Every structure is written in structure tokens, then in C-alpha cells.
Image (cartoon, rainbow, N blue to C red):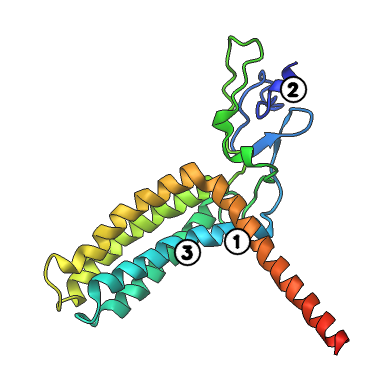
Amino acid sequence: MIGELVVFCGLDLIFWSCFGVCPRGQRTNFEKICEECSGCPELYDWLYLGFMAMLPLVLHWFFIEWFSGKKSSSALFQHITALFECTAAAIVTLLLNDPVGQLSIRSCEVKVLSDWYTMLYNPSPDYVTTLHCTQEAVFPLYTIVLIYYAFCLVFMMLLRPLLVKKIACGLGKTDRFRSIYAALYFFPILTVLQAVGGGLLCECHSFLFFNEHLKVFLVDISIILLSLRY
């Protein structure tokens, strides 16, 4: 009965605890035992991480152009600074992630969409007591994006105001900081998007990627058939 209901709860063999949440970086196997994730992200996972990492940079560039326009020659320097901020944030995030100090990722395999939303699958074996087994079953795809956004915000607040104050003299005092103010709005939106819709975005991204390859395959088949016909 428990084996059927407990989806993400497992037995920690290190501490021999009862069924409960697995430590970070682990998830349950078929025997409901917590085991360390030792795999590498798949292609779809890397594409998803790249997509989520590019969102802040694209938004930075958009708002820099939107508020700078042709009034200031500092837009190029702000673009380069935004690129440096996001690149530095990505490198620091990878170095701090497990394995620490390496530009690599140790990850758990994403099996189904529910792996992203473990908080919705806390079982009640006796219909009275709830086993709280909320964990990051898709380690580290869920938290690594949030950590990256946090570092992007920190680097932006450390570097961008000084740069804008020095070189954006062609704009007014309020206009020159509008791209920074815009980032203070879209970073919380991106955080909520990742926290709530990260799993849906990842699944949709994989589906769209597959469809693109399917289209290319169909085009190739059509070309071959046409060449054979003529």
C-alpha cells in the first residue's frame, strides 16, 4: 500500500530514517531507496537551461535599446556589460553547483512532468497523516536557474549603475537608469515563471525541439522522393 502511494518519499540508507524526503541531490529508485544522482543532463535539459539563461540577457538588451535609442552612444557598452553580467553569473553558478569547483553538472533524470512538482504529490497512506516529501527530483534543473537569476541581479546592481552613471551622460537622470529599473521588474517575473512553470516550459521546449527535427526529416524525405520522381 505504501509502495503504491509514496511517489517521491524514500528511505535514506545513510541515517536509516523512515520514509521521507530524500536529501538534496538524491531521489528514489524503484525500490523506494534514496540514491545519489550521478547522471549528466540530456540534450533537452541543456537546451532548456540555455533558453532560461538567455532570457535575462535578451530582456536586458531589449530594454537598453528601448530606453537608450538614438539618444545615447552608451548602448553598446551597456550591451557588453549585460553580456558580461550574465556570463559571469552562469560561470559562478556552475562553479558553486555540485560538483563544486567544476564547470559541469550532476543531475537527476527527468522522467515525467510530475518530477517538477513534487509538492503536489505528498501522500497520505492512512488518509490521516501526510508524508511531506517535497524535494528537487529534477536536481538541479529547478534551483540552478533561480540561483543564476540571483547572481545576475547581484552583478547587475554592482556593475551597471556605475557604468551608466559614467557614460550615459546624454540621457536625463531618470532616463539613464530605466533599463536597470526594468530589470528589477522582469527578474521577479522570471523567478515566478521558473518556480511555477519550469516543468511545463521544459516539456514544451523538448516537444518543440522534437517537432523541428521532425519537420527537417519530412523535408529531407520530400526532397528524396522528388529527386527519385524526376
Disc 1 target residue: 47
Q: Which mark is residue 121?
A: none
Instruction: Say which element carries label 2.
Output: helix
Kindly identify the amino acid type of the residue bearing the numbered disc 1.
Leu
Task: Give 81 or 185, whichever is nearer the viewer.
Answer: 185
For disc 2, the neighbor class at 10 Å (few under 14, some 14 to 19, many from 20) is: few
Q: Secondary structure at mark 1?
A: helix
Sooner in the amino-acid sequence: mark 2 or mark 1: 2
What is the spatial separation of the Cα atoms under label 2 and label 3, in whole angstroms?
40 Å
**Left or right of residue 70, residue 227 in this image:** right
Hey, what amino acid is under mark 2?
Glu
Dot 1: few (<14), some (14–19), or many (≥20) neighbours within 10 Å?
some
Residue indicated by mark 2 = 4
State the SS at label 3: helix
- Residue 147 against residue 61 in the figure, above or below: above
Which residue is the extreme one toward the right?
Answer: 228
Q: Residue at x 24, y 58 (%)?
A: 181
Whether tag 3 and tag 1 are in contact, CB under 8 A, the answer is no
Q: Position of residue 104 (x, y in %)?
A: 61, 58
User: Is 115 displayed left or right of 142 in the figure?
Assistant: right
Compared to residue 81, the image places residue 224 above or below, namely: below
Say which mark, if any, is on residue 54: 3
Amino acid at pointer 3: Met
Left of 195 or right of it: where is 183? left
Mark 3 or mark 1, earlier in chain? 1
Residue at the bottom extreme?
230
Which quadrant of the figure contains the N terminus?
A: top right
**Residue 44 in the image: x percent, y percent?**
65, 58
